[in-house]
Image (cartoon, rainbow, N blue to C red):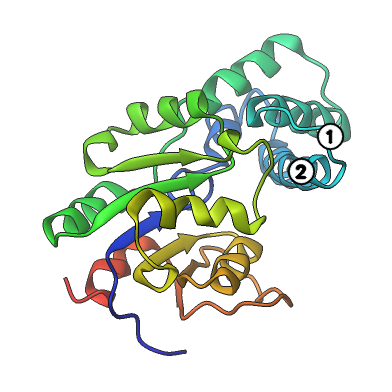
Amino acid sequence: MTEITGIKACVFDAYGTLFDVNAAAAHLKDELGGKDAKLAEIWRLKQLQYSWLRSLMGDCYVEFWQVTQDGLDFAMEAVGLKDDALRKKLLDLYWKLDSYPEVPAMLQALKDGGLATAILSNGSPAMLDGAVQSSGIGDRLDAVLSVDEHGFYKPRPEIYEMVTEYFAIAPQEVCFMSSNGWDAAAAAHFGFQVCWVNRTGQPQERLPGEPKKVLNDLSELPALLGL
């Protein structure tokens, strides 16, 4: 893996990268009867699968909030839960997911270093606004870009192109961070300089596009960029 240089903008995936997608289930661990980890795993998997499949099916796009609800419904049935009140609590918590502990200071360091910062996410604008506001990082971001503008999901190259168009810069001037191996690969294939935030020690995806760096978390990023 080579060095990362010539960066003008740092762009982040939202869910799993800046915001902890397991937080909603973790907050309700007791009510979930110890099924929180399994529920969170299935919920996230179905959320991603439904976004990909809807994109491939053509005219089946719905906002990520609907995909999130559909994924939860599948996950609850898969772990043997049927509780409308609990479902509502889980969905309400998804609007105010915890950011990872290192995120606010990391973003501030990037801003202090003169770099533009942004989110590029499958999330709907309202969902992203809720997460950004609840985590208090809005003043550290220059843009929050949602796939909703296009009506299909990552990893279509048109989604990554939103960044270069917004900032009027070349792909190689973007440092892109994602905790999703498939997202990191697709962004690298597009031409971004990519840091894969591999929080859980996953193997690398067998896809075109290779990240330049693999990070344990985002606290390492400012120093990596010479800040």
**Disc 2 to disc 1, how far (Cα)?**
9 Å
Depth check, front residue: 63 or 37: 63
Q: In x, y percent, where is residue 19? A: 46, 43
The residue lying at 75 percent from left, 11 percent from top is 84
Left or right: where 200 falls relative to 224: right
Tags 2 and 1 in contact by the CB under 8 Å rule? yes
Q: Amino acid at mark 1?
A: Val
Q: Secondary structure at mark 2?
A: helix
Q: Amino acid at mark 2?
A: Ile
Quadrant hosting residue 155 = bottom right
The residue lying at 62 percent from left, 38 percent from top is 150
Q: Residues within 10 Å of mark 2 (few under 14, many from 20)?
A: some
Depth check, front residue: 124 or 161: 161
Q: In x, y percent, where is residue 193? A: 43, 74
Left or right: where 115 falls relative to 134: left
Quadrant hosting residue 168 = bottom left
Q: In x, y percent, where is residue 58? A: 84, 40
Quadrant hosting residue 71 = top right
Q: Residue furthest left?
A: 112
Left or right: where 218 falls relative to 152: left
The residue lying at 30 percent from left, 52 percent from top is 117
* Depicted 214 relative to depicted 80: above or below: below
Lower sequence index among marks 2 and 1:
2
- Residue underneath mark 2: 42
* Depicted 4 relative to depicted 130: above or below: below
* Depicted 169 relative to depicted 42: above or below: below
- Residue underneath mark 1: 79
